[in-house]
Image (tube, helix red, strand yellow):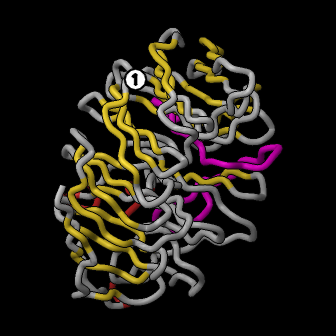
C-alpha cells in the first residue's frame, strides 16, 4: 500500500467555510457516524484511511461537508485511486468497486470468489491487479473488465507494480512472485527458513528499483527486481507491524513490533540507527526533506532526522489503532488524523506547530494551541 502521493490538486484549495449554495447539486452530506479518514472520498464503516486518497482530495474541501458518501453494509478495504481519479476499493461482499470521483456513482463492479484485504494496484497501462483470499491474482482492464486470473497462493497485501510494468506479489507462505503485465511468471523468491513468518505487507520499491520485502517475523530482504536474486537480508528486530519505506538518500526504514524504528543502509542492509518510539506503528512512516515522521499506537507523532535519528519534535495525536499514515502536502503541511477527537490536523512539518484542525464530525476548530514538545536532541 505504498504509493507516491500527488498533492498538486490541492494547491488551490483554501481552508475556509463554504456556504451550502457553493456545494455541487450532486453532493450529499456525510452521515453523523464515526469519523472518516482525513481527505477521504467516501465514508467507511470499519476504520479510516489516508494514504492513496491524496489524489482524490478534491472530493473533500476542509471546512465543508463531504461532497458524497458511498455506504454499503459490511466494510471497505483501504481505498486506491487511478490516474483518472476513479476510486478503487474492495468490499466484504467480495466485490471490487470502481467509484466515480465527482458523484460517488459506481462505475463498475467485479466479483471475486473470496474475502478482500486490499484494493487493486494500478499498472503502467492502466490495468488493475488485485489479490483476494481465493489465492488468485485478478487482472482487470481499466474499466473493470476481467482479463485473466492467475493462481499465486494466499496474499493479503496489495501487489506492487514498478516502472517496467512488472507486478510483484508477496504471499503469507513467504514467497515473492514477479509477473509480467500479462500475468506470466518471471521469477519466484522463497524466504529461507521453514519456521519464519511470511509476508503480510506489500513489497516496497526503492528509488533505484530495488524491491524491499519485509516479513512478519522482521526479516528485511532486498531483491533485484529483474532476477529475484537477494542482494542482502537482515533482521533488525523481532517482527514488523506495517510496511517500511525507502528514502532517496539510500536508506530503508522499517518499524519493529516492539516500537523501534530502524534505519538500514539500502545498499548493504546494515543498521544505521534505531530509535524507540512510544509504541509500535500500525501505519507506515513517511519521508520528506531529510525527515521521517512516525505515528505509533501511543499517539505521539514523532519527527526525526533521517541522518541520525535525532528527534526534532513530537505532537500528541491520540493513541488508537490506525491505518492512515500522515501525508505530506504542499508548502510543508503535514496532514494527520487525531483519532481521539476525530479531527483532521494540519501541522507545520518542520516545527510541529498546529496550523488548523477540522472536526470530521462537525465544523472546523481554529486557533487551538499546538500540543508539541520540542526536543533538545
Residue sitting at 62 percent across and 38 percent down?
216
Q: Residue 126's spot in the image, x, y percent?
A: 50, 35
Quarter of the figure that contains the C terminus:
bottom left
Give the residue at x 70% y 70%: 72
Q: Is residue 240 magenta-colored?
A: no
Query: Mark 1, residues whose alpha carbon is within 10 Å: few (<14), some, or many (≥20)?
Result: many
Circle 1: element type: loop
| Residue behind mark 1 | 269
Q: Position of residue 41 (x, y in %)?
A: 48, 66
Q: Going by the image, does 138 lie left or right of 60? A: right
Tell me if 127 is positioned left or right of 317 in this view.
right
Q: Look at the picture and state if 73 lies above or below 363.
A: above
Q: Looking at the image, which is closer to me, 320 or 34?
A: 320
> In this rendering, does residue 221 appear at all?
yes
What is the magenta range?
Answer: 97-126
Identity of the residue drawn at 56% across and 73% down: 69
Question: Which residue is painted at 40% across and 55% down in the image?
Answer: 277
* Dominant SS in magenta: loop
Q: How many marks?
A: 1
Q: Is residue 27 left or right of residue 177?
A: left
Measured from the top left, where is residue 366 in percent x and y? Answer: 26, 87
Q: Quarter-wise, where is residue 263 in the image?
A: top left
Amino acid at each position: 500500500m505504498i504509493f507516491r502521493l500527488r498533492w498538486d490538486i490541492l494547491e488551490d484549495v483554501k481552508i475556509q467555510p463554504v456556504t451550502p449554495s457553493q456545494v455541487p447539486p450532486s453532493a450529499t452530506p456525510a452521515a453523523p457516524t464515526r469519523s472518516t479518514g482525513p481527505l477521504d472520498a467516501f465514508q467507511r464503516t470499519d476504520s479510516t484511511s489516508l494514504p492513496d486518497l491524496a489524489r482524490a482530495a478534491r472530493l473533500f474541501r476542509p471546512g465543508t461537508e463531504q461532497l458524497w458518501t458511498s455506504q454499503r453494509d459490511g466494510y471497505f478495504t483501504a481505498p486506491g485511486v487511478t490516474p483518472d481519479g476513479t476510486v478503487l476499493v474492495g468490499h466484504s461482499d467480495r466485490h471490487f468497486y470502481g467509484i466515480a470521483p465527482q458523484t460517488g456513482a459506481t462505475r463498475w463492479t467485479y466479483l471475486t470468489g473470496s474475502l478482500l484485504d486490499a484494493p487493486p494496484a494500478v499498472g503502467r497501462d492502466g490495468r488493475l491487479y488485485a489479490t483476494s483470499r481465493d489465492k488468485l491474482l485478478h487482472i482487470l482492464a481499466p474499466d473493470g473488465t476481467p482479463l485473466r486470473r492467475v493462481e499465486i497462493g494466499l496474499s493479503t497485501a496489495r501487489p506492487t507494480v514498478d516502472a517496467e510494468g512488472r507486478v510483484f506479489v508477496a504471499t503469507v507462505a513467504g514467497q515473492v512472485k514477479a509477473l509480467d503485465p500479462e500475468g506470466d511468471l518471471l521469477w519466484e523468491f522463497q524466504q529461507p527458513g521453514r519456521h519464519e513468518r511470511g509476508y503480510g505487507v506489500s513489497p516496497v520499491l526503492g528509488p533505484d528499483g530495488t524491491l524491499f520485502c519485509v516479513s512478519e517475523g522482521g526479516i528485511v530482504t532486498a531483491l533485484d527486481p529483474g532476477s529475484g536474486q537477494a542482494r542482502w537480508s537482515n533482521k533488525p528486530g523481532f517482527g514488523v507491524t506495517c510496511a517500511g519505506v525507502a528514502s532517496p538518500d539510500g536508506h530503508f526504514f522499517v518499524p519493529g513490533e516492539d516500537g523501534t524504528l530502524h534505519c538500514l543502509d539500502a545498499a548493504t542492509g546494515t543498521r544505521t540507527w534505531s530509535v524507540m518510539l512510544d509504541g509500535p506503528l500500525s501505519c507506515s512512516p513517511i519521508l520528506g526533506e531529510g525527515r521521517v515522521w512516525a505515528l505509533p499506537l501511543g499517539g505521539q507523532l514523532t519527527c526525526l532526522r533521517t541522518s541520525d535519528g535525532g528527534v526534532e519534535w513530537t505532537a500528541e495525536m491520540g493513541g488508537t489503532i490506525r491505518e492512515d499514515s500522515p501525508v505530506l502536502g504542499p508548502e510543508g503541511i503535514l496532514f494527520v488524523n487525531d483519532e481521539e477527537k476525530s479531527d483532521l490536523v494540519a501541522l507545520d512539518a518542520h516545527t510541529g506547530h498546529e496550523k488548523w484542525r477540522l472536526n470530521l464530525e462537525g465544523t472546523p476548530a481554529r486557533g487551538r494551541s499546538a500540543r508539541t514538545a520540542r526536543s533538545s536532541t
